[in-house]
Amino acid sequence: MPQQHPGLSFASANRESPWRVYLEQIERVVPYLGRLADQAETLRRPKRALIVDIPIHMDDGRREHFEGYRVQHNLSRGPGKGGVRYHPSVSLDEVTALAAWMTIKTAAVNLPFGGAKGGVRVDPKTLSFKEIERLTRRYTSEINMIIGPDKDIAAPDVNTNEQIMAWMMDTYSMNVGHTATGVVTGKPLALGGSVGRQRATGQGVFFIAREAGQRLGIPIEGARVAVQGFGNVGGVAAEVFAAHRARVIAVQDESGTVYADAGLDIPALSAAAKSSGGVAASGIGETIDAEAFWELPTDFLVPAAMEGQVTRERANRIRTRALIEGANGPTSPEADDVLGERGITVVPDVIANAGGVTVSYFEWVQDFSSFFWTEDQVNRRLERILVGAFGRIWDIAREQRVSLRTAAYIVACERVLDQRRIRGLYP
Ligand code: NAD
């Protein structure tokens, strides 16, 4: 069981708490860390957490306040790295867990970054374009003192995009008095973005599914795939699966679930969902009940929406061979146990969706050197890093007879704690 930490008042023992899920994942890896285990406390605490008030003028002249966060979980290996989320359920607990998962993810794929994350508790669908710009600029100004190209670098996450990154970059640059493109990644190409970044997370989900499939005897061609979330991650992953002749039989987003046993026409679904506001009104496939989604027989199930989706109860009903975590933190530790007992392979978020942060790293490097790569260079380097990291994690899981999640945490925690050990304790 995770220990209680009185120093972290927000770290509730609530079963739905993403931070609780993260703490339990850490408890599961500690027995495998050998002499580094006595330093594991550093992983149970965020280094720095900032809560900010964001007052903005609404279009109708009213003033409204929003609450925002930026959490730096661990900076032992380099500047903080992590997205910014705009969602009504954003909380300090959630942002802290997401920051911690970035520490694990960047270390699992051996990028020279620490873990950070940001968010604003807001439903952006209720704001105008101009209101979102004002919210973004004020949020950026409020967290200005802890971000920067060599301090902490933001990126898109749920409900944020390259336009929001452009406003963050501009606001930060205005505040420091010079153009600093490296403060965010996932920027428009015209502002120093990288080719391939927008598709990188979904592309990476596919590379990792293919690697897992090779080892589990599941060929991609003809594989039955179900995807939850049809945004930046799930939408691109579904497209890439379909382009490689997998059968994407079901897609679920906030609007509903669509199904076609022969496989959905993903490019058509993508276009129709964009114009109709979601998959449910797209007119493509058959609309089915949201809970039935979890029971569809599949080879690959890809949760790519929000955390906490794969509960113990759903884990008992899931009929897939490999669950590839496109989202961050979709599976509870209890569900992990059920899936493991049922022989379903879970490929954890910290490797399955690491394609985004890997190309963010490429973008940051390109910004520093002002020397830009081709899409082919980006994709080949992305594939090499992800395939190498996955192979190592797979081998450790087999050798030590642990889940892929614990194996990924062994690799990542050893890297973070070893770096910490060598640096020593200040002062
Ligand atoms: P997005 O905003 O582009 O898309 C989110 C999708 O999930 C939308 O289709 C939305 O309708 C759907 N969704 C939301 N809540 C849902 C629910 N309860 N049931 C069904 N569908 C729901 O977000 P994104 O960037 O694709 O991020 C999705 C997940 O992937 C998040 O967990 C995020 O942290 C993670 N992630 C994103 C990136 C990235 O590069 N964008 C990188 C790594 C991990």
Image: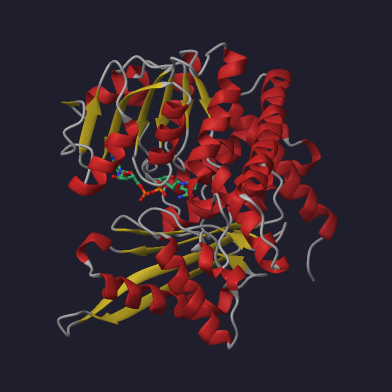
Q: Nearer the viewer, residue 126 or 317?
A: 126
Q: In this view, does 233 lie above or below 252?
A: below
Residue depicted at 47% across the width and 34% down the height: 325
Q: Nearer the viewer, residue 260 or 215?
A: 260
Residue 327: give x, y in percent of width and height.
44, 41
Which image quadrant for residue 132? bottom left
Q: Nearer the viewer, residue 190 or 142?
A: 190
Q: What count of labels does the image hold? A: 0
Q: Which of 163 and 175 is in front in this view?
A: 163
Residue 204: give x, y in percent of width and height.
55, 38
Q: Is residue 2 visible?
A: no
Q: Is residue 191 above or below residue 400?
A: below
Residue depicted at 43% across the width and 40% down the height: 236
In the image, taking residue 339 as reference, residue 418 lies left or right, namely right
Residue 399: give x, y in percent of width and height.
73, 19
Quadrant location of the C terminus?
Answer: bottom right
Scheme by which the image is coloured? secondary structure
Residue lying farthest to the bottom in this orientation? 177
Which image quadrant for residue 296? top left
In the image, taking residue 286 as reference, residue 160 lies left or right, namely right
Residue depicted at 58% across the width and 88% down the height: 177
Residue 377: give x, y in percent of width and height.
67, 46
Q: Can residue 138 be seen in this view?
A: yes
Q: In this view, does 216 lie above or below 156?
A: above
In the image, taking residue 393 as reference, residue 163 lies left or right, namely left
